[in-house]
Amino acid sequence: MSFTPQIGDPALKTPAVKQARGLCAPCPVYEKCLFHMPRYGGFKGQGPRNVVYSLRTDKVENHNAKEECVSCMNFVETMQDRMLSGRAAADEGRAGAERVSVLVGRTSYRMGTEMPFNGKGEIIKQPLYLIDDLKRAGYKVNQDDMTNPARWQTVVFDRIVPDYNAPQVTSSTYSEEISARMAEQEQRDIEEDDGRWEAKMAETDPQKVRRGRPPGSRNKEKDDEQGDDFA
């Protein structure tokens, strides 16, 4: 049975693993990763980074194409298999093949997406990390305009590849709270099922579910004893 280690797993923190994997020791997709190959950048073991790739479909899919930037881990998890299978399909001449290529050494990539414009021809409601790239491409951006867009339009511009930043990991008791609620509900369900079963049995054979003394007999012996004292 294969074991896929996760980030934070003690098995990835041993000196032997760190020596073999370098700065990529904690990576959960290390074994599957192909970034040791020069054609994909050859940086495996040097730590995570953002990579640029292009995706192009064949004529069956209208030759759609795009460039995108993701972390190397995200690429391995979501695009690497598509890259390999698409290449094999294209080499065999199969229809519907998509071609995924890692663009090594790129410091920017061509981004195209629909964005909202106001009546003045300004782009509105955009995240801060896109503002500089949009302005560099010559677009006017209004960060204060929160009105409804006058129109949507495809915007094409060069996006600078950002430095890789590890995802922020925050502690939370959310998962534990949900688990506790589920456990409580399951216990209530069990108790309700037991109650329904006992009620059903009482209807069919009351003697099987009768427990303790019969009704009215709890103090019978005590009452008899008290009666003897007054005899």
Image (cartoon, grey):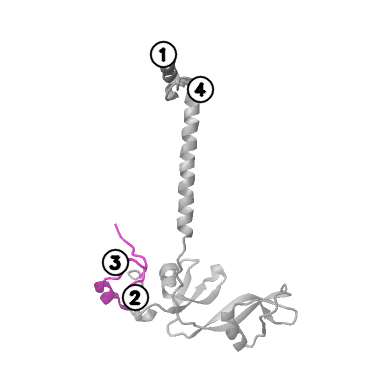
Q: Earlier in the sequence, mark 2 or mark 1?
A: 2
Q: Amino acid at mark 2?
A: Cys
Task: Looking at this view, name the residue that lies furthest to the front.
Answer: 230
Q: Earlier in the sequence, mark 3 or mark 4?
A: 3
Horizontal side of 6 relative to 16 (left or right) equals right
Do residues under tags 2 and 3 come within 8 Å of each other at their CB atoms?
A: no
Do residues under tags 1 and 4 come within 8 Å of each other at their CB atoms?
A: no
Q: Earlier in the sequence, mark 3 or mark 1?
A: 3
Q: CA distance from mark 3 to mark 4?
A: 59 Å
Task: Residue 45: give x, y in percent of width and height.
Answer: 33, 78
SS class of the residue under badge 3?
Answer: helix
What residue is disc 1 on? 228
Q: CA distance from mark 2 to mark 4?
A: 67 Å
Do residues under tags 2 and 1 come within 8 Å of each other at their CB atoms?
A: no
Q: Which quadrant of the rendered structure holds the C terminus?
A: top left
Mark 1 burial class by Cα count in 10 Å: few <14, some 14-19, many 20+: few
SS class of the residue under badge 4?
Answer: helix
Q: CA distance from mark 2 to mark 3?
A: 13 Å
Q: CA distance from mark 1 to mark 4?
A: 39 Å
What residue is disc 4 on? 203
Disc number placed over residue 24 in the picture, else none: 2
Disc number placed over residue 11 in the picture, else none: 3
Q: Earlier in the sequence, mark 2 or mark 3?
A: 3
Disc number placed over residue 5 in the picture, else none: none
Stretch in magenta: 1-29
